[in-house]
Image (spheres, rainbow, N blue to C red):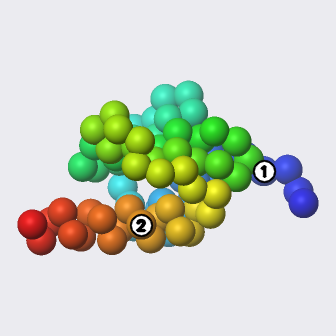
Amino acid sequence: MEDFDPKEFLLFALNHFGLEVQGQEGKMVYLNQAYTIEVEGQQLYKLMQDRQVVAPFSDVEELCRFIKMDMQLNEES
């Protein structure tokens, strides 16, 4: 497998799914609704909301789909 930058891959995927990045610092990526994603490794991402760990993800597509679904549910509430 080719070497790739997991953070750049994450940023590409977030853009593809229409998830707006509010900012980034080091290995942290900040989104709307107090979501933060920490890049922990080549294929490991930790999703947090309001500084609470939601879940680890090894699949970026699954991570993006989860965030989109959760954002939509929060908007409906």
**Local SS, label 1:** loop
Badge 2 density bin: few <14, some 14–19, many ≥20, Cα 10 Å:
some
User: Which percent across, then down, holds residue 50?
Assistant: 28, 38
Is residue 60 placed above or below 4 in the rendered structure? below
**Local SS, label 2:** helix
16 with respect to 49 (left or right): right
Please name whichever residue, 58 or 37, is drawn nearer the observer in this view of the structure. Answer: 58
Please name whichever residue, 60 or 7, is drawn nearer the observer in this view of the structure. Answer: 60
6 with respect to 24 (left or right): right
User: Which percent across, then down, holds residue 61?
Assistant: 56, 68
Where does the C terminus fall, quadrant-wise?
Answer: bottom left
Query: Residue 9 appears in which quarter of the rendering?
Result: bottom right
> What is the spatial separation of the Cα atoms under label 1 and label 2, in whole angstroms?
23 Å
User: Which percent across, then down, holds residue 21?
Assistant: 39, 49
Label 1 vs 2, first from the N-terminus = 1
Query: Residue 74 appears in which quarter of the rendering?
Result: bottom left
**Residue furthest top as drawn:** 26
Q: In this rendering, does residue 22 appear at all?
A: no
Q: Residue at x 74, y 47 (%)?
A: 42
| Nearer mark to the viewer, of 1 and 2 | 2
Q: Amino acid at mark 1?
A: Phe
**Residue furthest left as drawn:** 77
Q: In this rendering, does residue 14 appear at all?
A: yes
- Which residue position holds label 2? 66
Per the rendering, the mark at residue 4 is 1
Where does the N terminus fall, quadrant-wise?
Answer: bottom right
Is residue 43 placed above or below 17 in the rendered structure? above
